[in-house]
Image: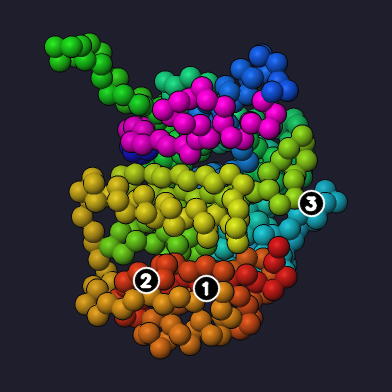
Amino acid sequence: MEPKTGDILAMAVKDDYDNNDPRKTPDSLLDIWSTLTPEQQYKEMYRVWRNPAVSDLYEPGSTFKIITTAAGLEEKVVTKEDRFYDPGYVIVGGKRLKCWRSNNPHGAQSFVEGVQNSCNPVFIEVGQRLGEDRFYKYIKAFGFGQPTNIKLPGEASGLVMTPAKMGPVELATVSFGQSIAVTPIQLVTAVSAAVNGGYLMEPRIAKKLVDNDGNTVHEFQPKNVRQVISEETSTELRGILESVVAVGTGKSAYVPGYRIGGKTGTAQKAENGHYVSGKYVASFVGFAPANDPQVVVLVVIDEPGGYSYYGGQIASPVVKSIISDTLRYLDVKPQYTQAELELKQKPLVTVPEVRNMAYKDAIKILTKNKLNHQLESGEGETSLNSLIVDQIPKPGSSMNEDGDVILVVKAIGAD
C-alpha cells in the first residue's frame, strides 16, 4: 500500500489452483472430491478461489503491537523511556501468559527495547494502562471489526471483542495480537495510518475509469476516513519501529541505504475455539523510507513448514526483497550512512555455507572469510553447540567484507 493515498500497488496470493484451468480439481481436494455432493464441491472450490487478502481472518500476533504502541503513545500512558521488567510471564486473571522468549526472559528494559524485543509482558502492561474502553476505541478507529470498503468482493469484517466482553485476560491477549481476528487488508491499512501521520485511508485499487477512446469516465479520489493519532505520535512511532529493524527482531528486513521500519508477528493458529499445537501464522509488516513512508508491505505465511515459524526469520526477508525492489522501481534514492558507505568500499567476498553446523564452527568459518554475524534464535537457550538452521544471505551470495551474516539458530529447548 502507498500509505499516504491508500493505493494498493500490489496484491498477491499463492493459490492452490491453476490460473489457466481454474475449474480443475486442486490436488488438495482430490482425495475427498468423489465423496462430496455437487453443492459441497461448489463450496470447496469457492473456498479455494477466494482472495485471502480480503476474505480470510487470522490472529495478527505481534504485528498488532504497532496498534497497541500507537494507542499507548497517543494516550500518553507510556513513554519511550518507561522501564519494564520481563520475568518471562505475567499472571493475569489467574492465568499465566508467557512471553515468546519465556525460557530466556528479556529482564529489565525500556519501552523501546520492549518493542524491539517484541516482549509480550510489556504490551500487556500497556494494554492494562489503556483499559478496555480506550483500547477498544483505538482498535475501532484503526478500522478493525469493519470492512475497509476496498472495491473487491468477499471482504470480511474481522472479529473484535467489545469492552463488555473483554475481561482482564482478553485485554491482555489482544494487546499482543491474540483474541482478535483481522484480514490482511485491514492490517496493512491500519499500519499505513499509524505511519503516514495518523490518517486512515480507504484502500484504492483504481484511480480512474476510461472508455475505449481514452476519455475519463470516472475518477476515484483518495478518501481520508479519519485521523486516528496525531502526526507527532506517528513520527515517534516510526522512529521506534525503525529501531526494530535496526537492532530488534526485524533485522532480516534491513536494506543498506534505506531507512526501514517494521514489526514481526508470530501467532499460534486457532481452530474451533482452541489453539492448535504446531500450527502458526508468521508475518512481517514493513515500511520505507522510515522518515517519509512511500510503501507499506505485509507478508503473511500461513502454516510455514521447515525449521522455523517465527515471522522475524522467514517473513521479514521476503518483505526486505519486496521493499528493496519497490523503492528502486519508484526511483526512491538510497541515502547511505557513513558506515554503510565505508562498508560498500570494501572488497566483495562470497558467503560460505554454514547451515547445519554448530554455532562455534560457523563463527570460525565466517571470521576466516572476513565476515561478521548477527544471531537470531527462537525460544530457548543458545550455546556454542547450537545448530545453525538457516543463514541470510544464502551461501554463494556476494557481500562486502565485514558485512553481517544473519545466523538463525535452533536454540536448545526450542520447539
Mark 3 residue type:
Val
Residue position marked by numbered label 3 in the rendering: 92
- The residue closer to the viewer here, 4 or 364, is 364
Mark 1 residue type:
Arg
Q: Which residues are magenta?
A: 5-33
Badge 1 or badge 3: first in the primary sequence = 3
Residue 210 occupies quadrant: top left
Give the foreground label among 1 and 3. 1
Left or right of 371 in this view: 93: right
Residue ID at (43%, 82%): 366
Confirm whether the magenta stretch covers residue 254: no
Q: Position of residue 20 (x, y in %)?
A: 41, 28
Residue ID at (43%, 29%): 19
Q: CA distance from mark 3 to mark 2?
A: 49 Å
Q: Position of residue 190 (x, y in %)?
A: 48, 37
* Placement of the N terminus among the 4 image quadrants: top left
* Secondary structure type for disc 2: loop
Residue position marked by numbered label 1 in the rendering: 355
Is residue 348 in sight in this rendering? yes
Dot 3 crowding, Cα within 10 Å, few <14, some 14–19, many 20+: some
Left or right of 69 in this view: 269: right
Q: CA distance from mark 1 to mark 3?
A: 40 Å
Q: CA distance from mark 2 to mark 1?
A: 12 Å
